[in-house]
Amino acid sequence: MKHWDILLSNQVDKKNFIDTLLSGKIQGKLSDFNTQKGILFSDISIQKLIEEEFKHDSIEATVEAHRNLRTFSSGERKKEFLKYCLKQNPDYIILDNPMDHLDQKSRLELATAIETISNSVRIIQLVNRTADLLPFISNKAQIENNSFELNDIKITEDHSLENNEYKIPIHKEVFKDGILIKMNKISVSYDERSIIDSLSWTIKQGEFWQLIGPNGSGKSTLLSLISGDNTKGYGQDIELFGRKKGSGESIWEIKKKIGSFSTSMTDLFNRNTTLEEMILSGFFDSIGLYRQPTTLQRKIVSQWLDLIEMTPLKNKIFNRLSIGQQRVALITRAVLKHPPLLILDEPIEGLDDHNVALVIQLINTIKRETNITILFVSHRIEPNLAPNSVLELQPSPTGSKGVIKQHI
């Protein structure tokens, strides 16, 4: 069977491309799919089916297992949904970034499952990163714009920010005792299910950590303990920015000391917010700009826009920027007030290789030019990032253990 592995730039309107494929109106080398029946495998498709099951109190995808799809782990959920897609008897399946949000073990298992079904159904895999291309698919191509034209894949070198003449426009501040977060033998469970078991972790000023672990190992739980959002932190031996958890600290005082990025933040800003306004709002921890910024604050943002090479775009509507530009701008917003701790939760998921390079260059610049502590959360080990230490969550029957690895 003739399968396709297609590398998509973030400049491509992926939804339109997929809709064109499924409606049988695609032109060029993929036109032989126009007379065939296709189905979409994507995170959005999986979420829609989960919502339908919940709405109708039914089991659609996993009748044999007598379990709703939402009860499976991320990796198992994707494998079960793949089986569900096959039951619809399609001629081909469009796989939209199937490896996103999966740990390494789940990636390998899903890749094996995809290769197995390729004997009975045609595959069109759409990915943003070269590393996610499947080796068993020989037909590989690249789409760079909304002409949807298939081109040969070419690897381009990105310009680095390393030699940028601008310095990060913030002052180095020293946290009073150098220790930001201290956890001593913490354990967390939900409904008698153990999530974290006796984990100890100290995060100091100026360190660069990566948090890794398989799906369901407790990464989100750990982040919510650090941000002060999780009530499971009460009664445990946790210190947040010099204060014992439960000693009367304000959750807003904690949040002021943390700059956060997550991919869901992209959708928070309305259609009229400009790039400059979005970054300026970081001074006020607001979604949107409702206060008049000072001359100094505008100057600082101007310097940041120079640093990330987006000054010509400052009046452009934020939602109309490329995904990579949005990510870089949101990380800039997160570090605007120089928080002691910067949490980056999967900042490169869904980005193409060019935009991954942009984000990594910014992270490296923050590391080099400031003493901000960086906590980078990702399943991937990026070759161009060099965290000082890694905390790996390793699941066990009594909950995940925390294993610290230095200087990877």
Image: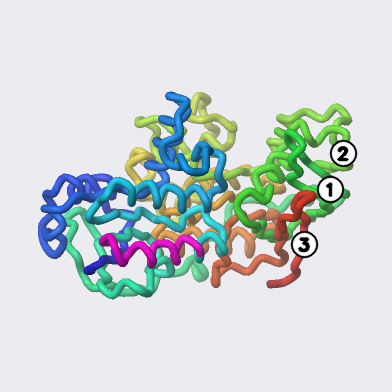
Amino acid type for the residue under numbered disc 2: Gln
Q: Is residue 165 visible?
A: no
Q: What element carries label 3?
A: strand
Mark 3: which amino acid? Val
Q: Mark 2 points at which residue?
A: 236
Asked if one can make out residue 105 in the rendered structure from this viewpoint, the answer is yes
Which secondary structure, mark 1? strand
Vertical placement of residue 159 versus 77, above or below: below
Mark 3 vs 2, N-terminal side: 2
Q: Give me the residue at 66% from left, 54% from top.
A: 375
Depth check: 240 or 168 in front?
240
In three-dimensional space, the C-alpha distance between marks 2 and 1, rounded to whole angstroms, equals 8 Å
Instruction: Tell me the residue at 45%/39% (across/down).
Output: 63
Magenta segment main secondary structure:
helix
Evaluate if marks 1 and 3 touch, with contact meaning CB atoms under 8 Å apart. Answer: no
Query: What percent of the width, then of the height, locates residue 45?
Result: 37, 42
Query: Foreground: 347 or 200?
Result: 200
Q: What stretch is highlighted in magenta?
A: 109-122
Q: Distance between the residues labelled 3 and 2?
A: 20 Å
Quick one: SS at disc 2?
loop
Q: Does the magenta stretch include residue 199?
A: no
Q: Is label 1 or label 3 in front?
A: 3
| Quadrant containing the C terminus in the rendered view | bottom right
Q: Where is residue 209 in the image (x, y as percent from the top left)?
A: 69, 59
133 relative to 343 in the view: left or right? left
Residue at 24% of width from left, 62% of height from top?
143
Name the mark on residue 403. Answer: 3
Q: Mark 1 points at which residue?
A: 183
Q: Which residue is farthest front?
A: 64
Where's the N terminus, which quadrant?
A: bottom left
